[in-house]
Image (cartoon, coloured by chain):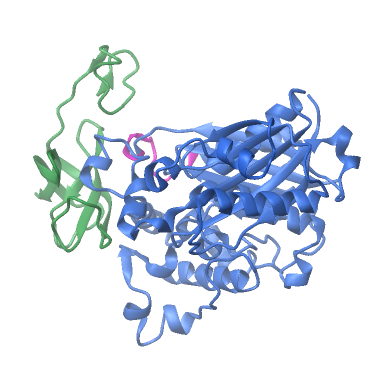
Chain colours: A blue, B green
Amino acid sequence: MRQVGIVGIGHTKFGRMDFDLVDILAWSSLEAMKDAGISGGIDQVFVANMGAGAINHQTAVASALVSRIFLEPAMAETVENGPASGASAVKCAYMAIASGMADVVLVTGGERMREVIPWKATDFVATLTHPDAEYAYGVTLPAFGGMYTRAYMERYGLEERHLAMLAVKAHRNAERNPFAHIEEMASMGGIWDGPHRDVVNPIMADPLRLYDMCPVSDGAASLVLCAMEVADRFKKKPIRVAGIGQATDTHCVHNREDILDLKAVRLAAERAYTMAGIGPKDVSCAELHDAFLILEVAISEAVGFFKPGEAKLAIERGETEIRGKRPINTSGGLKAKGHPVGATGVSQIHELVKQLRGEAAKEERQVKNPKVGLAVNFGGFGNNVVATILAKE
Amino acid sequence: MVCKACRTRRDPSVTVFPDFDKVPLGGPCKLLTWTRIFALPDGIDRPSIAFGIVEFPNGLRALGQLMVDDPRPGAALVARSGLVRELVGRDFYGLQLFSA
């Protein structure tokens, strides 16, 4: 197989965007091509998107994007894998290049979820659950986040304050990220132990509070990937895709042997580590899918950063801060940067490339001398997970 | 549904895998975890709704709507079938979980 690298990155601001979905995709695509120093020459386009058909009444968005930015006759496909669509599209790009079918691939993930009212956006995401055994009950992804959080707290003694500490970290990182949806800092006094906690930070999916959850966002992120053997055609040095792992688990959460075991995360990470020839201790920084803050905690344990139940100690010691021993979600994460579902997996890789290039320094959120980055994109409620490892050459 | 050969648990798939035993769910069960949500989907005509995952004495588990005011993990419950959601032109019936 050929080696694959990333030579261009692009990103729109996340938040509310009152523009056509394909325009949103086009802006980040053109940014990535500009970053790579090209205006064409793309062999294949993959667009990661979950909701265009359901909420924007538009299908075949990859074909639309190619035409919007004059990339015909490039090959084009839309990739839909729930909230893991972004990393799946990166995996497809990797396979296309590694196989020799393409030399240069554009991956763009994007979503326009705020075109509909919030409950419709929540409902559309909930359609990924089992139609009879879960969705029919009115269950939502935040409900699964709440149930998971309670079970985790019961077993491992995690407290609500630990989640509040993560929220403060996420907002602090996002405040320095020009693409983030949430631009405001949060404080423990405001969201946790202040007199107006239940007004500022109300319970949404008990025990999860408002600040424990990601916002509903619009936005897009893009990457230009190429075969390492042609990387000298581009303006920026390549960041190598060192490993990709993917795994699935039961559709219904209640059918898992242990409802707290994120088996698909664990296996996806193990496969990615094996492919890259590294282990968790070698990871300099990570972007983990914290749609609910409990997932930053649980995923960080499932990928081997901490023993089960011990992530809370790392939170207390500040180890997951940008200047800590194990920086996690330096972008602000889904929690504060935002979560346009199709864009998220691509945006995580965008952040890792930025860190590995040293380009986060100008935003004052640079990890010190990073060599390896790990992204975990979590589909469903953990039933389809993609882990990606990037390495600085 | 439980596989006759390996006892794997799955949810409704009769048309695909006839070799599964249908195991009726209902009656006494134990609450494993729960939540209450306040941002509700269409078809729920209440100010909030609670969900729980329960385990039955035969080891099977299920999601259900929790009809208990003060739930606690480990609590003994009883599962009964009831109307769980009303969408336009379609009613959904499923498990509702009550105090034992």
Q: Residue at x 31, y 20 (%)?
A: B7
Instruction: Please state if B90 lies on the left or on the right of A85 as rendered.
Output: left
Q: Is residue A255 magenta?
A: yes
Q: Is residue A257 magenta?
A: yes
Residue in front for this viewpoint, A279 or A321? A321
Pinpoint residue A392: horizontal percent, then vertical percent: 82, 48
Residue B9, relative to residue A281: is it above or below? above
Pinpoint residue A252: horizontal percent, then vertical percent: 34, 36
Can residue A45 be seen at all in this image of the molecule? yes
Q: Residue at x 46, y 67 (%)?
A: A163
Q: Residue furthest bottom?
A: A195
Q: Quadrant of the C terminus of chain A?
A: top right
Residue in front for this viewpoint, A200 or A222? A222
Residue in front for this viewpoint, A326 or A185? A185
Pinpoint residue B48: horizontal percent, then vertical percent: 20, 61
How many labels were placed on the picture? 0
Q: Residue at x 38, y 68 (%)?
A: A210
Pinpoint residue A108: horizontal percent, then vertical percent: 62, 45
Instruction: Please state if A148 lies on the left or on the right of A11 as rendered.
Output: left
Residue A135, relative to residue A24: is it above or below? above
Q: Quadrant of the N terminus of chain A?
A: top right
Q: Residue at x 43, y 69 (%)?
A: A211
Dominant secondary structure (helix, strand or loop) of the stretch shown in magenta: loop
Instruction: Please state if A208 lies on the left or on the right of A50 as rendered.
Output: left
Find residue A213 and report its image quarter.
bottom left
Find residue A317 and report its image quarter.
bottom right
Give the residues drawn in magenta, as a range: A253-263
Q: Residue furthest right?
A: A232
Residue A372, relative to residue A227: is it above or below? below
Residue in front for this viewpoint, B15 or A20? A20
